[in-house]
Image: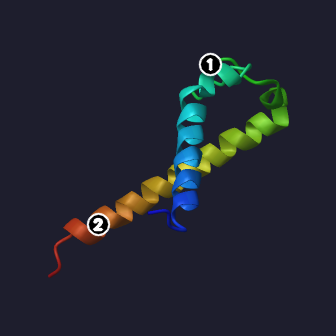
Amino acid sequence: MNSWFAPLQWLVFLSLWRMSYETANINRTNAVEKSFLIERTIPEEAVNQREKEWTEKAVKNYTDAQEKKWQRWNEAMFERSD
């Protein structure tokens, strides 16, 4: 009845058991809370005025490019071909 799969079965069982224990207790082991929500306070890195200007310029250029892309797409999809 004992086969060479028995140790492998125990190894898989114990590793799955340990993983379930770790995932169940993940919040207890982390001392620092992490928030993945957007924060309204400006981080210290973004205080630099030049970086702020570059960021605003990059966002503006990105939105302009996206508007042009969607405008071209709309023209290509919905324009009548004569």
Residue drawn at (62%, 18%) of the image:
40
Provide residue 67's location: percent of width, then percent of height.
44, 53
The extreme front residue here reads 1
Query: Against 45, is 70 above or below?
Result: below
Residue neighbourhood size for the residue with mark 1, other residues' Cα within 10 Å, grouped as few (<14), some (14–19), many (≥20): few
**Viewer-proximal residue, 55 or 17?**
17
**Viewer-proximal residue, 75 or 34?**
34
Provide residue 72's location: percent of width, then percent of height.
37, 66
The kind of residue on which mark 1 rests is Arg
**43 displayed left or right of 17:** right
Query: Against 49, is 17 above or below?
Result: below
The extreme bottom residue here reads 82
* Type of colouring: rainbow
**67 displayed left or right of 7:** left
Provide residue 31's location: percent of width, then percent of height.
74, 19
The kind of residue on which mark 2 rests is Glu
Residue drawn at (55%, 52%) of the image:
10
Residue neighbourhood size for the residue with mark 2, other residues' Cα within 10 Å, grouped as few (<14), some (14–19), many (≥20): few
Residue drawn at (80%, 38%) of the image:
51
**Viewer-proximal residue, 43 or 62?**
43
- Helix, strand or loop at label 1? It is loop
> Which residue corresponds to mark 2?
75
Q: Quadrant of the C terminus?
A: bottom left
Residue drawn at (24%, 69%) of the image:
77
> Which residue corresponds to mark 1?
40
Tag 2 and tag 1, C-beta contact below 8 Å: no
